[in-house]
Each structure stands twice: as structure tokens, then as C-alpha cells.
């Protein structure tokens, strides 16, 4: 599943299209009709954790705001318009895999309207929430191509779920994404590991619970954007066993773990924006950098998703009080 750094990159790919009008649509989505985007304006693009939010408005709404779209005030405004890491419209991201889509939110005739007769509820719910699942991606001004033959031996290119052509001349192609109309996003950036407002104290408090730290790290309420790769890498670099109870770890160990979460995530994002490959030390490895045999097992809260975890018994020993 694309983690925070990947979704941040997608956000930067989409951001140059903010303020442009959709002039042509396509794609295989059946539940989310691609034609419904025709003549809409992309007003804003926001990212939080593993989710991307796109705000579309019809032309008449844009005219009410003036000839050029105005940014929406909110907690993301600085991050949504960050020019420092913005990419050009020719960057791309690879993709392959299953796909899905969400159901659009209908608007009824009883929805409230403003004095001009515009449907306020419909406007408020014209945010497109994009979830990338296991293999989702966004391509800019290009389409994904098959890298190998399928089980039938056919070299068929992946089919995008949604394609949006803009009046600026470029287009976006969404692959294997789950998309649905939603109300305006309401999230707290203090839990986003790649936000400059990430609250380390809140994260440390969550990690100090009497449960395995590998469970807490994947809790998006405290570590939004953190996925299985970041979890494995941060635990290894902090020298902490995945099943160590947070309540038994020292404050310095927990602080080191949070530092490695932020550092690895930021480095991963920087490498993505520079087109560099990701380098991991423990994830999907047979040996750690010290040459020790790596263990692999699925861990997760009882009755919930179990995630594959890689760790080194020598570099990440369990505390004596935690031994079975």
C-alpha cells in the first residue's frame, strides 16, 4: 500500500493542475462516472497521511470567486501550496494491480441553496477522496505500460480508473484507486508524520501504552501516513523488537523510535521527489546489515489485520521481562 511519502508525491504531481478546468474525461470506473467531471474546475488538492483529497467545483462556482480560483483557508493551506517541493507536470509513478472505486454522493432536491440558487450541500460534498489501496498510483501526461505478460500471456497495458484532461493541455490518469465523493475533509495534521505540525508528544504518549509498539505504529490516529515499510525500518533502526510493550520501554527508546519514523519518512519522500530508489535495511531482507539472519512473521491485534514484520533477533532483542 502506498504510504505517506508516496501520497505526498502524488499530491505534488496533482498540485500544478489546481485552477484548471476539466475539458475531457475517460476511464473504466463504473460507480464513479468519469463524465461527471466534465467542465468541473480543480480548486484545491490536499493530502493527509495515506489519503488525497481533490476539490472540484462547476464553472459557475468559479465565476463567483473571480477569474482565478482562490485557495481554501484551513490547516493544510501551507502544505497544499508548498512550492519548494513542487514537481513539474512530466513526473510519473509506476502502477499495477487490482482496482476499485467508490459511490458518488447524490444530492436531493431538498438540499439548501444560497440566494443565487446554488446547491450548497452539493458544493460542500464535491471533494473527491482518493485511496490508493495496495497498488494505486497517479500518472501525469502519460499512461502506465505493461511490464510483463499476464497469466494468459497477453501484454495488456493497465486500464486507468479515471482520466482527466485539463484546459492547460495536460492530463491525470488514476490507476487502481478507490475514489468517492465526500464532505470537506476534517483531519488533525498533528498526527501526520510528514506534517510540520506533527505532535511528537502525542505520538510518545500513544507509544507508551501497554501493547506491542508495532500495533501502535500502524494506528493512523497517531501516525497517519505510516505503513508497514516505515514500521519495519523505524523499529530496526531504533533497535526495538516489534512485540515490545511500549509501557516497558524507556522514554529515550520511544523518543528514538519517533525520531526514526520522521527521519526515514522524510528521507523516503526526498528520494522519491529526486527519482531515487528506496533503500531499506530490514524490510524484505534475509540478513540485516550486520549479517544476522532476519526473522519474518505476521503480527497484529487479535481479530484485526495481521501485517508481515521483519526483525533481527540480535539487533532487536526482547526485554528480559517480555520473554515468554
Image: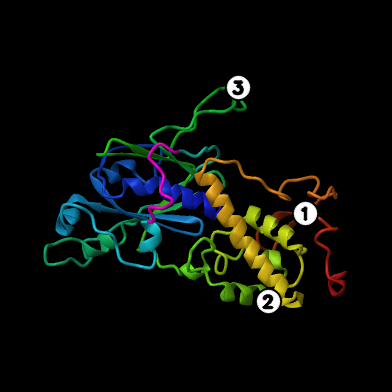
Residue shown at 26%/46% (left/top)?
20
Mark 3 burial class by Cα count in 10 Å: few <14, some 14-19, many 20+: few
Q: Tell me the distance, in whole angstroms, between the alpha carbons under discs 2 and 3.
A: 51 Å
Q: Residue at x 57, y 75 (%)?
A: 202
Say which of marks 3 and 1 sits in front. Answer: 1
The location of residue 48, given as percent across then percent down, is 46, 60
Label 2 Cα neighbours within 10 Å, binned few <14 / some 14-19 / many ≥20: some
Alpha-carbon distance for marks 2 and 1?
A: 22 Å
Locate the C terminus and report the quarter of the image it occupies. Answer: bottom right
In the rendered structure, are the residues bearing label 2 and label 3 in contact, judged by CB atoms less than 8 Å apart?
no
Q: Which residue is mark 3?
A: 153
Q: Earlier in the sequence, mark 3 or mark 1?
A: 3
Residues at marks 3 and 1 touching, judged by CB atoms closer than 8 Å: no
Residue 199 x, y percent position in the rendering: 53, 72
Give the image quarter of residue 29. Answer: top left
Q: Is residue 135 placed above or below 228 in the rendered structure? A: above
The secondary structure that dominates the magenta segment is loop
Q: Which residue is mark 2?
A: 209
Question: Circle 2 sits in a helix, a strand or a loop, which is it?
Answer: loop
**Dot 2 or dot 3, earlier in sequence:** 3
Can residue 158 be seen from the camera position used here? Answer: yes
Question: Is residue 216 or residue 77 the one in the foreground?
Answer: 77
Residue 211 seen in this snapshot: no
- Residue 297: which numbered mark, if any? 1
Residue range (magenta): 82-91
What residue lies at 50% left-to-right and 45% top-to-bottom? 273
Q: Residue furthest front?
A: 84
217 or 158: nearer the viewer: 217
Amino acid at each position: 500500500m502506498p504510504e505517506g511519502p508516496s501520497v505526498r508525491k502524488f499530491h505534488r504531481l496533482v498540485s500544478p493542475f489546481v485552477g484548471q478546468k476539466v475539458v475531457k474525461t475517460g476511464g473504466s470506473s463504473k460507480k464513479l462516472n468519469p463524465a461527471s467531471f466534465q467542465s468541473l474546475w480543480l480548486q484545491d488538492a490536499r493530502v493527509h497521511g495515506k489519503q488525497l483529497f481533490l476539490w472540484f467545483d462547476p464553472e459557475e462556482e468559479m465565476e463567483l470567486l473571480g477569474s482565478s480560483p482562490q485557495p481554501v483557508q484551513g490547516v493544510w493551506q501551507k502544505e497544499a501550496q508548498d512550492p519548494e517541493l513542487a514537481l513539474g507536470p512530466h513526473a510519473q509513478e509506476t502502477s499495477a494491480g487490482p482496482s476499485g472505486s467508490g459511490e458518488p454522493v447524490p444530492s436531493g432536491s431538498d438540499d439548501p441553496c444560497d440566494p443565487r440558487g446554488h446547491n450548497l450541500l452539493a458544493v460542500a460534498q464535491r471533494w473527491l477522496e482518493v485511496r490508493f489501496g495496495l497498488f494505486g498510483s497517479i500518472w501525469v501526461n502519460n499512461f502506465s505500460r505493461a511490464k510483463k505478460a499476464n497469466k494468459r500471456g497477453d501484454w495488456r497495458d493497465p486500464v486507468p480508473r479515471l482520466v482527466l484532461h485539463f484546459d492547460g493541455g495536460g492530463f491525470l490518469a488514476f490507476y487502481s484507486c478507490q475514489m468517492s465523493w465526500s464532505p470537506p475533509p476534517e483531519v488533525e495534521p498533528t498526527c501526520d508524520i510528514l506534517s510540520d505540525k506533527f505532535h511528537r508528544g502525542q505520538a510518545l504518549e500513544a507509544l507508551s501504552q501497554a501493547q506491542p509498539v508495532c500495533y501502535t505504529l500502524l494506528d493512523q490516529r497517531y501516525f497517519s501516513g505510516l505503513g508497514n515499510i516505515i514500521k519495519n525500518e523505524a523499529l530496526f533502526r531504533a533497535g526495538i523488537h516489534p512485540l515490545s510493550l511500549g509501557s516497558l520501554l524507556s522514554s529515550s527508546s520511544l523518543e528514538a523510535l519517533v525520531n526514526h519514523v520522521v527521519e526515514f519518512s522524510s528521507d523516503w519522500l526526498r528520494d522519491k521527489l529526486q527519482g531515487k530508489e528506496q533503500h531499506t535495511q530490514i524490510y524484505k531482507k534475509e540478513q540485516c546489515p550486520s549479517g544476522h539472519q532476519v526473522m519474518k512473521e505476521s503480527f497484529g491485534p487479535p481479530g484485526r489485520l495481521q501485517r508481515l514484520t521483519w526483525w533481527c533477533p540480535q539487533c532487536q532483542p526482547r526485554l528480559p521481562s517480555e520473554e515468554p
